[in-house]
Image (cartoon, rainbow, N blue to C red):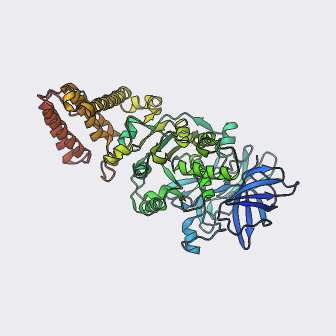
């Protein structure tokens, strides 16, 4: 289906139900699902989207407050699907769910935003230095690269529109400074039609950008083969996420989702980060907006905001726009992936997004599914996460889009429909535990509840880049955690007296693994950002400790040893690799272990 039609069509409001309106149009009118319309209320034009077409009537969801909308009001149908404007100038910005730049709105209208206002996401006056990458006369496929403009630390590639049906021939282009709306090139279609190209293009947000390109094999979808390095040990070691993969972080209130996703966004091995604040509290988003411009970026040397886009549609903003905000964010992610960049999209939270769908579905009187969510909830979640992936682009570069969604189940109930549908879709599940959060075990990822299908899928990379025995060693450590938990459950009933010394030592080893490796201090500069090389050294050291056959006279001696060595290990985690403390704590760990076991720990 085409994303645009010729000319506008007018309709009339014949019913209003909160943010949902019913419109009627002429039989000759060409109306399509997801088409954008504007409800005229006095001098205001309220943006809306068609959700369902039935004969001469259609249901539209309005993205604004519908106070004042009456039967008989005129609706202007634009002939265009709900679309995002894609081009240079997106990075470093904060948008609402419909891609309106919030800082521009605040400058023009103050902090209380009026309804019916729409502003271009890209600055129409800013000039960009365009540098061609090809010669005139070259034939390029849809998505082929014409040239680039510098945007912060990146080259923003200017591409042939993705909706072209066939390869086109470039007939004119020139190196110069251009604004977003100025023509930078011209090309000819196989039918002989001459078309102009600007720095920006538009794309309907509910349609995947690579859809037609993959079908015609202009690009290629590849299998994720490289892990995403997050610098969080429990994720990178035990529950890895692939670049171009999918993951979810469900957890109850207060379990540390916000801090964890902030760490992942800050330290992950990606080029561009897109954060979609979908229905969460405004206070959390404001904190992110204030922190990122002041936070040094370890990858580029600038600020973290230089390579970040924030889509802000909080719980205090219109519900209808909340549902569209995730599609807006993922369309931006697909756009930068087509340039060959590695993109991370964090959607916080998909529960609020699903609740917005539930409200709209209820107003449309659709047959409800479990807990009144729409019957198509499962397919909607799958369609969303399937837009992540690895793409070999038309110019030969490879881009990835990694999608991590946080889920906020009421009361931490992982059996509710959104969590269950998400678990059936993603390949990494990082379940946060209220019990671990209460104990201040952060990140509060429960190692006995979480899982990752990427551990075995990425085995060739782990074996070649880290250690041939990496997978088996990680599984051995997981088995130790499970045995330790079983022993702890027995101790809860019988006390320490009810278990043997050998079992007590085994439990203490599992506690050491938890305290020294799984837990991580988000507010320590060194411990919060642990690169792969340091993680490998730490894991090898810990493995030697945990596989050693220590001899203790009694449980008190074992407890004293593991308490002391846990403290030393944590201090070693806080020490820079090039500092004297790093070697000193390593020696102290070796000396302490040597008192109970002849063991050489130094690499």
Is 397 or 389 nearer to us in this picture? 389
Task: Residue at 34% x, 30% y: name it.
Answer: 482
The residue closer to the viewer here, 115 or 363, is 363
**Can see residue 231?**
no
The residue positioned farthest toward the right in the image shown: 28
For the point 78% across and 65% down, the residue is: 71
At 57% from the left and 69% from the top, the residue drawn is 104
Residue name at image x 76 percent, y 46 percent: 1
Q: Quadrant of the C terminus?
A: top left
Residue 11, given in percent of the width and then of the height, sits at 81, 61
Above/below status of 590 relative to 74:
above
Q: Position of residue 417 (x, y in %)?
A: 55, 41
Where is residue 428 drawn, in percent x and y? Answer: 47, 37
Q: Say left or right for 47 vs 8.
A: left
- Image quadrant where residue 379 sits: top right
Q: Is residue 474 left or right of residue 31?
A: left
- Indicate left or right for 150 with 180 as reference: left
Q: Nearer the viewer, residue 377 or 603?
A: 377
Vertical arrangement, residue 500 with respect to residue 331, above or below: above
């Amino acid at each position: 289906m085409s994303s645009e039609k010729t000319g506008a069509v007018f309709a009339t409001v014949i019913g209003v139900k909160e943010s949902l309106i019913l419109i009627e149009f002429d039989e000759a009118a060409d109306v399509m699902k997801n088409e954008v319309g504007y409800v005229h209320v006095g001098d205001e034009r309220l943006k809306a989207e068609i959700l369902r077409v039935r004969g001469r009537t259609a249901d539209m969801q309005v993205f604004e407050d519908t106070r004042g909308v009456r039967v008989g009001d005129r609706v202007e149908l634009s002939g265009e699907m709900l679309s995002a404007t894609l081009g240079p100038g997106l990075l470093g910005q904060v948008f609402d769910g419909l891609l309106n730049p919030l800082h521009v709105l605040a400058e023009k209208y103050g902090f209380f935003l009026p309804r019916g206002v729409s502003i271009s996401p890209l600055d129409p006056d800013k000039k960009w230095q365009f540098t061609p990458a090809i010669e005139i006369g070259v034939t390029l496929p849809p998505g082929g690269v014409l040239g680039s403009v510098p945007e912060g630390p990146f080259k923003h590639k200017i591409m042939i529109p993705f909706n072209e049906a066939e390869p086109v021939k470039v007939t004119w282009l020139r190196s110069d400074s251009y604004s977003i709306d100025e023509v930078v090139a011209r090309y000819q279609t196989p039918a002989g039609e001459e078309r102009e190209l600007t720095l920006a293009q538009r794309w309907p947000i509910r349609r995947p950008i690579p859809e037609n390109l993959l079908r015609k094999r202009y690009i290629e979808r590849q299998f994720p083969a490289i892990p995403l390095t997050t610098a969080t040990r429990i994720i990178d070691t035990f529950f890895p996420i692939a670049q171009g993969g999918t993951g979810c972080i469900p957890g109850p209130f207060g379990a540390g989702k916000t801090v964890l996703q902030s760490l992942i966004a800050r330290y992950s091995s990606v080029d561009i980060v897109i954060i979609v604040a979908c229905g969460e509290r405004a206070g959390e988003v404001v904190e992110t907006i204030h922190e990122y411009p002041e936070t040094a970026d370890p990858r580029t040397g600038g600020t973290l905001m230089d390579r970040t886009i924030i889509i802000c549609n909080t719980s205090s903003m219109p519900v209808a726009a909340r549902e569209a905000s995730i599609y807006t964010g993922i369309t931006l992610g697909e756009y930068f992936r087509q340039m060959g960049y590695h993109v991370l999209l964090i959607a916080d939270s998909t529960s609020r997004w699903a609740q917005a769908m539930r409200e709209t579905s209820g107003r449309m009187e659709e047959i409800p599914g479990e807990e009144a969510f729409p019957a198509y909830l499962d397919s909607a979640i799958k369609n969303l996460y399937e837009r992540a992936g690895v793409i070999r682009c038309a110019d030969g570069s490879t881009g990835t889009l990694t999608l991590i969604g946080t889920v906020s189940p009421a009361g931490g109930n992982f059996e509710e429909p959104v969590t269950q549908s998400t678990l059936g879709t993603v390949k990494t599940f990082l379940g946060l535990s209220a019990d671990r959060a209460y104990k201040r075990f952060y990140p509060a990822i429960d190692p006995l509840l979480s899982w990752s299908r990427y551990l075995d899928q990425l085995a060739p990379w782990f074996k070649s880049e880290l250690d041939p025995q990496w997978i088996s060693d990680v599984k051995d450590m997981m088995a130790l955690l499970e045995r330790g938990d079983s022993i702890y459950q027995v101790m809860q009933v019988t006390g320490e007296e009810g278990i043997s010394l050998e079992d007590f030592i085994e439990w203490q080893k599992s506690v050491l693994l938890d305290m020294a490796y799984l837990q991580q201090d988000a507010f320590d500069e060194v411990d919060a950002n642990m690169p792969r090389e340091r993680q490998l050294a730490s894991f090898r050291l810990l493995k030697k400790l945990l596989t050693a056959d220590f001899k203790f006279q009694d449980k008190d001696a074992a407890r004293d040893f593991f308490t002391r060595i846990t403290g030393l290990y944590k201090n070693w985690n806080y020490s820079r690799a090039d500092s004297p403390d790093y070697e000193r704590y390593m020696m102290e760990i070796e000396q302490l272990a040597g008192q109970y076991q002849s063991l050489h720990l130094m690499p």
